[in-house]
Image (cartoon, rainbow, N blue to C red):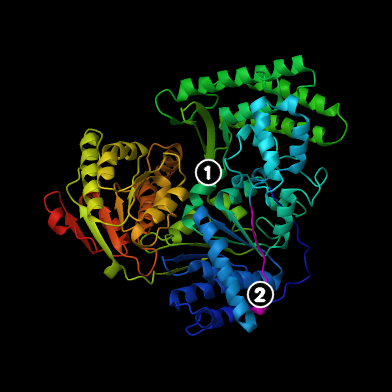
Amino acid sequence: MISLTEEQGEEKPVSKAPALVASIFSDGGWLTDALSLEHRSEQEHMAKAVASVLKTDQSLLFEAGTGVGKSMAYLVPGIIQAMDQNRQMLVSTHTISLQEQLESKDLPLCRRLFAAVPELKGYSDFKSAVLLGKSNYLCSTRLSHALAEKAGLFSDDEYEELQRIAAWSETTENGLRHELKPAPKVEVWDSVNSDSSTCSRRHCEGSACFYHKARGRLKAAQVIILNHALLFSLIKSGGAKSEGATHEEKGILFPEDFLVLDEAHTIPEVATDHFGLSLSSYGIERSLKILYNPKTKRGLLKKRGEAEVARRVTDVMEAAKHFFSKVDEKLLSVRPVVRSREPDAVESLIDGPLDSLHTLVGKIADSLEDGRERDELLEHKARLKGIQASISDWLSLSDKTHVYWAERAGRNQSTVILRSAPIDVAPDLRRHLFGCGVSVICTSATLAMAGEIEPFAARIGAESAKSLMVKSPFDYERNMRVFVASDVPLPSIQGARLSLQILADYIFFCTQKVTGGTLVLFTSHSDLRAIATELEAKFAAIGRPLLSQGESASRTELARQMRTLGNAVLFGTDSFWTGVDVPGDALSQVIITRLPFDPPDHPIIEARSDRLREEGLNPFNELTLPDALVKFRQGVGRLIRSKSDRGLITILDSRLLAKTYGRLFIECLPNPEFQKITKESREALFRPYP
């Protein structure tokens, strides 16, 4: 993990942010005067609130509707605060698209503002950097050693790939994996990336090492951009703060930093995912093959008593294969995700062989002189111990505040993963975020439930944070039309096939009527695939490109294609409900096929429901429904992304009308006026914008 230290001053100077923000964001202020931007009272309100809490290191939950301009509302006061007090602002996002927007649009806009106003000119030279995990960077030292030790580490094909990486290393500026096209093979990249103790000041030359140059840029930056997944991985591992910082120091990753969490509605889910354990059969096999691959007879330990090394690594591989097959047989024979409720559900067949290999690796490391090779083996020794501890933890269900389960994954569902997660993530977030003595600002267009942010605050351990809300400045009554199909059958196992036929018919009808692009949101991958297969030829016949999640392209690439094509139909599931930004006619309609209720049988949902029942509460009302309402608001929010946008929301789930909770979904709509349609009436009633 990337880390840095800061020298601690005696006393920080007072920030000028509150006074300057008032002059910047007021009607007729510097923002409108210098950049000719429209004044938004909602943005002014948010910017002042951010400046106020930053001044006193308080925390803030701020729901800001689409179009408020929340990025500028937190970046401007944050940059001023960071530069006035020689601190660092972390800005964490959930999606790559928002991260790219901050880098390419919002931060340059801040710089233009500061440069254009004499009173702000001193802030125009702020520096920003993107924080990425170490495995994203090429390590030149590891690369040179890999090239020198080719015979012991790589097959001919792998060595050819290594040479391609070496050629690229001569021209790349940043040494980042995603800049190498096509992407490097995982097995080869693992041998040359910076995620190793051997990529350190001790072994690498700072001026030549891509990772250490990136760390230097971080040290000089006032604004550091990262994503939620990396943020919580760093926090769980002790964080970048761990180098040179004491536990008493204020800060989350770096001493005295402060944090903005944009797209904060995803925080409970992402934090839950990272504060547990995840150990896969594939990951263990990869770790072992780095030490020694019995099939190719290559690896770090090739020259270190090959017969003994081969035997012990093979023993662990066979034990691991047998262990995970037992997990699969006992827990996953019926469903791909199953909760483990009893300790020692499977015999720990792997413990002895792991212990034996751990001892051997330690013995070999101890026989070597102090240096790079010894450090690398000691790192793998620690990794083996970590695998052993994780399996023991999972088998014993050691943490009573966590839920444990197994799941199948991978292209052929051949990988078995042992998982755990906190049933309630609030204590972890209270400790690692809101208890660090610095400001944490959470913002999103969807934090509230029925107009109240308190339930979200309780869920993330932010009960002491200030909470505020401003609505979107967009004219939804004029620019959004809502249609609800009342004749789609209620979801049922018996009527599933008929429902899919009716959904497919509605989707084709509605997309035909809208000349721009349509985003169709599903709650089920199988439904998406079935309807895509049904409609693919029909869309092709009318010249409408069909883009489907899961075919190969990433969400970012599919959204880019939709923006470019202008009239595409994009089918997406879970991740497409949030963060997709396609302004203009390229997204003229959002179709919601089903209300987005999470499956009640997922182990995390199941465990949380059990706890709520024990407390005398209704899991549907307290958990399932609130989560669905937030996701529904996010899905609807994909449609209107700018002041000039207009389009249709078409809902194909009749539970909106048939169930008592349906009114809560209707109240979530920015324009709650809707038109009912049926197959018989839709030709006359379904009216797109001209």
Please provide percent x and percent y for residue 609.
41, 42
Quadrant location of residue 5? bottom right
Horizontal side of residue 542 vs 425, given as left or right: left
The answer to whether 220 is drawn above or below residue 31 in the figure is above
* Res. 34 mark: none
- Residue at x-position 40% and y-position 58%: 582
Query: Does residue 129 belong to the magenta stretch?
Result: yes
Please provide percent x and percent y for residue 615.
42, 46
> In the displayed image of the protein, which residue is found farthest to the left?
680
Quadrant location of residue 383? top right
Q: Nearer the viewer, residue 468 or 636?
A: 636
Which residues fall within the magenta stretch?
121-131
The answer to whether 300 is drawn above or below residue 520 in the figure is above
Q: Which residue is mark 2?
A: 123
Q: Which residue is mark 1?
A: 273
Please provide percent x and percent y for residue 379.
74, 35
* Residue 542 seen in this snapshot: yes
Secondary element under disc 2, as helix, strand or loop, is helix
Amino acid type for the residue under numbered disc 1? Asp
